Amino acid sequence: MTMRDLPPLKALRAFEAAARRGSFTAAGEELNVTQTAISHQIKLLEQWIGFPLFHRQHNNVALTDRGSQFLPVVRDSFLAIVGAVDRLSGGANSGTLVIGARPNFATRWLVPRLPRFATLHPRIEIRLFTAFRFQDLASQEFDAAIEVGDAGASHGGDLLFTGEVFPVCSPSYRDAHCLAETSDLARCTLLHMLTAMQDWPHWLRTAGLDSGLFKETGPKFDSYALTHEAAAAGWGVALARTPFVADDLRSGRLVAPFNVSASLDRSWHFVAVNPLKPAVQSFRAWILAEAAGSSREAG
């Protein structure tokens, strides 16, 4: 084999980006070229190798069977090149890593664990940005993000965990209100998350309770982090999402007075926006291991 036997590098980059993003337009945005340029490069590659790589659809693209077989070969080759250059240049596991996440995820789960990542990779500088909507993070040039969405949907990333909701409160609040049965909630102050007002009715139905227990008049907050803090302060009972209160439950700062959880239709995914960057690869391996540990603790 000679160098002339290799497909054009620019076409291979266009293919990898389009396959990963599921869109010629998104691949063009990532590589700072037009959608037409991506389409042209992929057509050139398909002509060079002699078979189609994508099924063209109205709003997106999907890999053919041969395209699916070709993608890991191309991706692994790029990763091998990047890794070799990084090692030879002395820059392995160094540089800046820009991460996007929702405020609740960042506050309740990610930030308390980031010191462990920093200990393992002291030469990687973390920059963490938060936004309530994943789209708002697009204005930042980030390397990776945590996306939250429907549990059954494809997010083009790695599943971290699904979750459940269950009531939590401070130990003193539990004792003062003698919380032993789920029906005891009738004499409690319920704490609400403004963008998830359906959570309490959902949990009450799962617990087999009358929806009349639902009190919209309770205090309302714009994040789960705030509802958890209000619960820890003894204001009332909040609904918590696994695994964001695992540390508080372990320390006894919060307690779960009832053994009833309601499944969510939401899931958390790690999305590598810049997957070839060594720091992203290190962070991906670390966060998947941390998520697996959280799932075992929650279980």
Image (tube, rainbow, N blue to C red):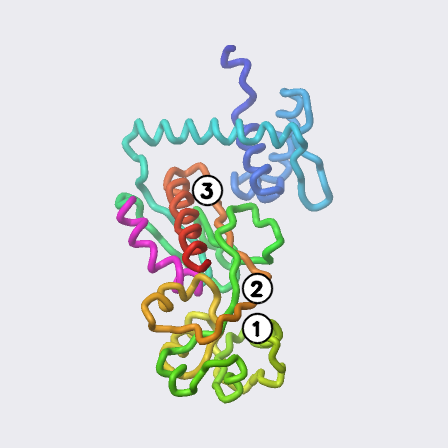
Residue drawn at the location 43% of the way across and 54% of the way down: 296
The answer to whether 192 is drawn above or below residue 248 in the figure is below
Q: Give how far across and how far down residue 44 sits, in percent.
A: 64, 25
Q: Give how far across and how far down residue 210 sits, in percent.
A: 62, 82
Query: What is the crowding at mark 2: few (fewer than 14 residues within 10 Å), some, or many (at least 20)?
Result: some
* Foreground: disc 3 or disc 1: 1
Name the element at disc 2: strand
Label located before the other in sequence (2 or 1) = 1
Query: What is the crowding at mark 1: few (fewer than 14 residues within 10 Å), some, or many (at least 20)?
Result: many
Separation of disc 2 and disc 1 at Cα? 9 Å
Asked if residue 170 is among those painted magenta in the image, a careful observer would answer no
Query: On the image, numbered disc 2 is attached to which residue?
Result: 263
**Most extreme residue toward the right, as rendered?**
58
Residue nearest the observer in this picture, 5 or 155: 155
Query: On the image, numbered disc 3 is attached to which residue?
Result: 274
Residue drawn at the location 64% of the way across and 34% of the way down: 39
Name the element at disc 3: loop
Give me the disc on residue 203: 1
